[in-house]
Structure formats: structure tokens, C-alpha cells
Amino acid sequence: MAAAIEVDVENPAGAAAALRSTRAVRERAAVLTERARCGDSRWFTVHDDALDATAQLVADVTRRNYPDLQVPFHSRWRHFEAGGVDRKAALLRGAEARALVDLTVVSVLLDAGAGPSWSYVEAETALRLSRSEGLGVASFHAFTSGLFSADPNDPLRVDAAGLAGLTEQQLAEAFQVDGANPLVGLDGRVAILHRLGAVTAANPAVFGAEGRPCGLVDTVGGRSVRASELLSLVLSSLAPIWPGGSMIGDQPLGDCWRHSALDGPGLTAGWMPFHKLSQWLTYSLLEPFGWAGVDVTDLDGLTGLPEYRNGGLLLDAGVLRLRDSADSSRSVTVADELVVEWRALTITLLDEIAPLVRRRLGVDADQMPLARVLEGGTWAAGRALAQQLRGSLPPLSIVSDGTVF
């Protein structure tokens, strides 16, 4: 992991910069996990005796899904393969590699939870897809139709003008949303794409004169980049797109929330950073960056993703237990301390489960970095348990605006 950069945490810009690193994510998550292990959490108890069985479950799911253990990265690109269809093959022939970075950025930003009632029917295959796969395939076809491009002669791209002109009605039509097929947070998704357009237009040094997300490739400017450095670029260049709920002064923090048990220097005190969507974006950029000729290295610099499949695995497998079972049925938001702590514990426990999974599979961290453990993996096992126990619903009832979960 890259060495920490000294910043002035007594001013908002410095404090925000200090929270935009996976080192900060891991260190603060570890504090909350150790506190819970000591019995001091208001919300959860930690049951280490369930870790081995959980790792075995993940290993079993991984072997079932990938008998040869050739596990791909946990990435938005897996959703583009929904139903066993290789949608990217024709796209790779018809679009420049950098355009696939454009697609990845927009698709990831549209990826937060769809809700239980929405689905997408793909015209070419007649497949009905829901949740992440449906969102992925819907965004894929929206991209190939030119929805995010202002140039009708060059539809396979995303640019600032195309994003600025996007309407809620256009996105609803592309995602087949109507009264009988509601999508959670549709307005939030349009708003975040508008902000993406504004940010790319305002930062030509990174995104070029036309404000294209694929400018990230040019900004890296080399044949390789460490995953933590790519995340830092994503976080610093895209920070203004996140909703303004979490702020230090005039600095938007994105996926960063308060927890009363956390300390920290200066203005960082009390904040628990996650950057889940930015990390999901970074994981999802591994392949398109490679296609564009840039190798992303040191993948375990990124953390596991603190979302309801990985966190749900820990609750459903008994590694975590709610102190008050009634919390499983009440509605909570991403800002609630219960959810903040659940996500923090998920970060640390995924780091602990990963080597246990590798040992059971007979592989090392080079063969199966966390990006593959998640895919193999913890996310798939979490989804399988949720399907068995609750028809796929998460173990907590989370009110989502479509920008985190």
C-alpha cells in the first residue's frame, strides 16, 4: 500500500484528503472491530468461532462456481456477462479500449441497489434480469445506444455534454422503468450522472476537453499503476459528484459517515470512511485499464466492499450477531450508526476471512487476491444465503437513495 501522505488535518481539505485512503478505511474499521470483540459495541457481537465455517462456505461456493479456480476479478464486467452472454466481445471489436473505461464509470455509478421490484428484459436474448445484473445489462445497452454521448456519429463514448443533457425520462426509458417496474433512486442516479458531467467538464486536465471519464487512463500516464493510487485518483478527481450529506467544511466526503466511538486527529475525528462505490469502480477498472495497456498492480491495497452481500454473509453465517434482533426489521439508513458499524466490521472481517479461504483452496494471495476472493466468493455466498433465508433480501432493511447500496 502506498505510504501515507502528510496532510494538515486541521483544515477541511487536508482532513478530507486524509480520509480518502484505504489505509484510513482499514485503520478505523479495525478500531471498531476490536471494540466489538471486547463486547463494547451497542449493536453487534463478534463470534470468531464462526469464521472457519464461513471460510469453508466461501471456499465451497468458489469451487462450485469456478471448478478450475480461474476466478475473475470482482467487477462490473461480471454483470455484463449475465446469463452467460459475452456482450463485451462485439464491443471490444467496435470501440476503442478507452471507451470501455467510459462505460465502466457510468455503469458503476448506476449500480447501487435496484430494489426488489425492478427488472430489465434484454431485447436480444429475452432474458429478464434484476438487481446488479439487470442494472449492468441495462447500462450496457444504454451506452451502446449512445445515451451518454453528445455526438451521434460517435455513440460509443461518454462525454460531459451527453451527461448534462440526460433526463430522468430518458434514463427511465432506457431502464424500462414505469409504475409497474419501479427502480429505487432513479432521480438520484440521474443527479449523480449530471454531477459526473459537471466534474468532467470542469477538469480538462484529467478528463480532456470533451470531459470523458476515460481521461483517467491518460492521467495515469504510464504502463502500470498501483490499485491504491488509481483509487486515490478516482477519489480526488470525482469527489464533487457525491451527494453533499457528508461534509467537512466545504469538502464533500462521499461514502464517509459518523460513528461516536471513533477518534482521530484534527477534523477527521469521528469519521468512518468506506468509499465503497469508488472502490467498486476501481475494481471494475482493472480489466478496461488492462485492455488500454495499463497494468494495475498491488490489488490488495483495496479493501473488501462493505455492502449488503458481504455484510449479509457475516450476519447470516453467524460471525456477526445483532444485540437486539428487532434491529433486523426496522428501517435504517446508511448514516445510522448501526449500518456504519456493520460496514466497518465487514471490512476487517473480509480481510481475516480471505486467507482462510485461500488455505482451503490451496492458493496464495498472488493467485487469488481479494478481488478474486470477493467474486468467488464472499459476495456470491452472501447472495446465496440471502436467497435461502429471505428470498434475496438483505438482513437489514436499508433505505437507499441509489448512491451507496
Image: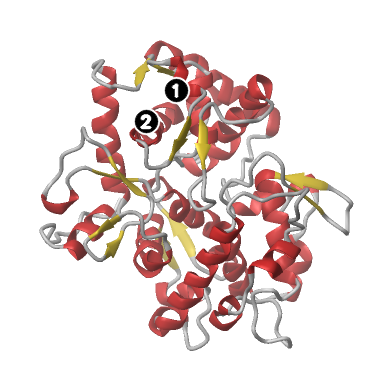
Q: Which mark is residue 338?
A: 2
Q: Secondary structure at mark 2?
A: helix
Residue 360: x and y in percent read 53, 22
- Seen at 25% across and 39% down, the residue is 27
Q: Earlier in the sequence, mark 1 or mark 2?
A: 1
| Quadrant in the picture for residue 203 | bottom left
How many residues crowd around disc 1 within 10 Å: few (fewer than 14), some, or many (20 or more)?
Answer: some
| Residue type of the residue flagged with mark 2 | Leu
- Does residue 287 appear in the picture of this structure? no
Residue 89: x and y in percent read 76, 63
| Residue type of the residue flagged with mark 1 | Asp
Residue 50: x and y in percent read 45, 13
- State the scheme by which the image is colored: secondary structure
| 199 to 308, vertically: above or below | below
- Seen at 42% across and 61% down, the residue is 242
| 206 to 230, vertically: above or below | below
- Does residue 395 appear in the picture of this structure? yes
**Left or right: residue 152 compared with residue 148:** right
Labels 1 and 2 touching (C-beta < 8 A):
yes
Front residue of 320/302: it is 320
How many residues crowd around disc 2 within 10 Å: few (fewer than 14), some, or many (20 or more)?
Answer: many
| 50 to 373, vertically: above or below | above
Residue 215: x and y in percent read 48, 77
Front residue of 324/314: it is 324
- Seen at 75% across and 52% down, the residue is 179
| Quadrant in the picture for residue 157 | bottom right
- Seen at 51% across and 19% down, the residue is 54
Front residue of 380/2: it is 380
Q: What residue sits right under mark 1 in the picture?
A: 327
**Left or right: residue 227 compared with residue 132:** left
